[in-house]
């Protein structure tokens, strides 16, 4: 996968969502690099996470149900940016979202961004701040990611 092409796609998807900022695009790219090394679309060892952002389908359903359903204009933008029928948003099912996130890079980009958008804190600016933000809000404190692994994959 060309990182340059992925970065360009991330920028374009986030612009379509009206959720673009340099910091947001940078964090989405770094998250995808760390989660999948930009080569895995399924979690290793038969885990449930899918896509380059390694999102668990229940997380996408939760995002649709508890965030996008209260923001219908944003929901429509996400559906359009991902070329996904609105019915997948109005009646979200984990099996559908597992497939969508594994096969649709624009959807994965959107949901990584939406995951961070739901955090009631400003986006981080520095590499260390990004690590702490990613670890707390995306990977979780119980997650396996380490600071050393983060730095190794980012650089």
Image (spheres, rainbow, N blue to C red):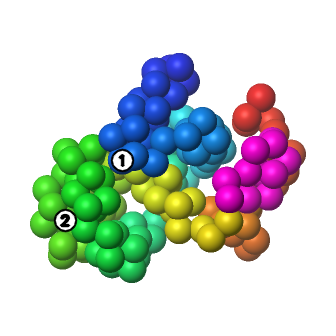
The mark lying in front, picked from 1 and 2, is 1
Based on the displayed image, in which of its 4 quarters is residue 15 positioned?
top left
Q: Which residue is mark 1?
A: 17
Q: Residue at x 40, y 73 (%)?
A: 67
- Asked which secondary structure carries label 2, the reply is helix
Q: Which residues are magenta?
A: 122-133
Residue 61 visible in the current orientation? no
Based on the displayed image, in which of its 4 quarters is residue 71 positioned?
bottom left
Confirm whether the magenta stretch covers residue 155. Answer: no
Question: How far, Cα to Cα, is label 1 from label 2?
Answer: 17 Å
Q: Residue at x 81, y 42 (%)?
A: 126
Q: Which residue is mark 2?
A: 88
Q: Residues within 10 Å of mark 1 (few under 14, many from 20)?
A: many
- 142 vs 100, left or right, is right
- 64 vs 47, left or right, is left
In the image, residue 11 above or below residue 94: above
Residue 14 visible in the current orientation? yes
Residue furthest out toward the bottom: 66
Confirm whether the magenta stretch covers residue 125. Answer: yes
Q: Position of residue 38 (x, y in %)?
A: 54, 35
| 52 and 76: which is toward the camera | 76
Circle nearer the N terminus (1, 2): 1
Q: Position of residue 41 (x, y in %)?
A: 44, 45
Q: Position of residue 33 (x, y in %)?
A: 61, 39
- Asked which secondary structure carries label 1, the reply is loop
Q: Position of residue 111 (x, y in %)?
A: 43, 56
In the image, residue 45 above or below residue 63: above
Q: Residues within 10 Å of mark 2 (few under 14, many from 20)?
A: some
Residue 128's disc number: none
């Amino acid at each position: 996968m060309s990182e340059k092409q992925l970065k360009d796609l991330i920028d374009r998807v986030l612009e379509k969502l009206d959720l673009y900022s340099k910091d947001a695009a940078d964090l989405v790219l770094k998250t995808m690099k760390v989660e999948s090394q930009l080569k895995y679309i399924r979690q290793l060892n038969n885990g449930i996470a899918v896509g380059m952002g390694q999102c668990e389908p229940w997380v996408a359903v939760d995002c649709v149900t508890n965030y996008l359903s209260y923001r219908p204009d944003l929901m429509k933008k996400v559906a359009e940016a991902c070329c996904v029928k609105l019915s997948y948003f109005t009646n979200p099912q984990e099996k559908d979202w597992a497939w969508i996130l594994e096969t649709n890079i624009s959807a994965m980009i959107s949901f990584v961004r939406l995951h961070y958008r739901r955090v009631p804190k400003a986006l981080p600016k520095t590499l260390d701040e990004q690590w702490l933000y990613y670890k707390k809000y995306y990977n979780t404190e119980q997650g396996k990611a380490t600071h050393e692994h983060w730095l190794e994959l980012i650089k």
